[in-house]
Amino acid sequence: MIELSLNNVMKYLDANLVLKNISFNIYDNERVGIVGVNGSGKTTILKLIAGVETMTRDDKGWISIPRGKTIGYLQQVPIFPEDVKVSEVLNLAFKELDVFEAQMKLLEQEMKSLEGEFLEKALKRYGEMQHQYEVQGGYDRIEKLSKICGGLNFNEDFLEKNFTLLSGGEKTIVMLGKILLENPDILLLDEPTNHLDMESIEWLESFLKTYKGIVIIVSHDRYFLDNVVTKIIEIEDMECETYRGNYSEFVKQKEENMLLQFQQFKEQQKQIKAMEKAIKELRDWAIRADNNKFFKRAASMQIRLDKMTKNSKA
């Protein structure tokens, strides 16, 4: 089932064309790597999916995401109050659960003064809230925190640190942890292995391979992509090509495609030379025999040759 698609997207940034013809589909639970040279538009695609960058009237195409799907994307590290601890930043991932918990506690207090039919209705409502709380992972909160903190090597001392005093790399890792805790339907990661040690990278690989949802990764780390993704989308000359498999399989497929194109080019060049020779001979025969039919055949062949030459240059 298609959960995300870009259709003939053409995007301008500051009057500069950055994406020309981008079309691809991503299915539920796929892990996709987006690759390309620096400045090819990879991050712009992530921003368009996240809604950080929007389509203007000069742009074309459309992006389709099912209504209600949640998206997690770390664009930049937000500013927090100076006294906020790392643990408090991570727990912001559970802010909706915190609101839910507060409502449940308020209802618990109200039930102490209720009786009879009013108490029965309140108990029924409380049971429904408990079920919803469980569905949203409320009772797994501590386990989730422990899993993410362990994987990213956040020890107790680090969790008690002032977030604003962390280095830029440390802040990025904390925000990565927060996004993983939020567990969005569509997870967008831009160079996620930056600032991570080898142990944390290996943990992140394992975490993403069992992630329930779409994962889209922009990364120059080919080994990370090899171990995680199942599809590669290459951005080249503002357009894209989709390849099945991990990064190594993408490289192999691309090399095979380039070899095939080269063989086709060589065959075409042979055909062009043969046609050029035939045209010259037809014209020579036409002149010697004063035969207009040879001129017409040469002209017809020249038109075909011109089209072939034009297509080979395109």
Image (tube, helix red, strand yellow):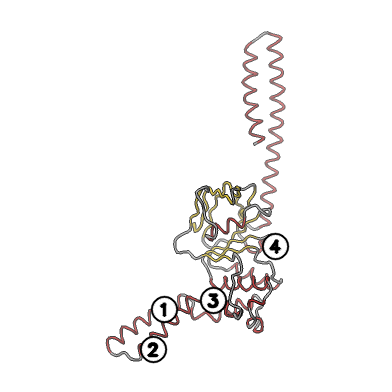
Residue type, mark 3 in image: Leu
x, y (%) of residue 185? Answer: 51, 66
Question: Which residue does the image show at 54% across and 58% down from the upper left?
Answer: 49
Q: Earlier in the sequence, mark 1 or mark 4?
A: 1
The mark closer to the camera, 2 or 1, is: 2
**Where residue 30 sits in the image (x, y, percent)?**
56, 61
Residue 2 position, x and y percent, is 49, 56
How far is the residue under mark 2 from the one under mark 1?
19 Å
Residue farthest along the top direction in this orientation: 290
Disc 2 residue type?
A: Gln
Q: Earlier in the sequence, mark 3 or mark 4?
A: 3
The 10 Å Cα crowd at callout 4, few under 14, some 14 to 19, many 20 or more, is few
Do labels 3 and 4 touch, CB within 8 Å? Answer: no
The vertical placement of 174 against 299, above or below, is: below
The amino acid sitting under disc 1 is His
Image side of residue 193 versus residue 70, left or right: right
Q: Quadrant of the C terminus?
A: top right
- Which badge, 3 or 2, comes first in the chain's sequence? 3
Looking at the rendered structure, the kind of residue marked 4 is: Tyr
Residue underneath mark 2: 109
Residue at the image position 69 percent from the left and 28 percent from the top = 272
Secondary structure state at the residue bearing disc 4? helix
Residue holding disc 1: 131
Along the viewing direction, whichever of 112 and 222 lies nearer the viewer = 112
Q: Which mark is residue 223?
A: 4
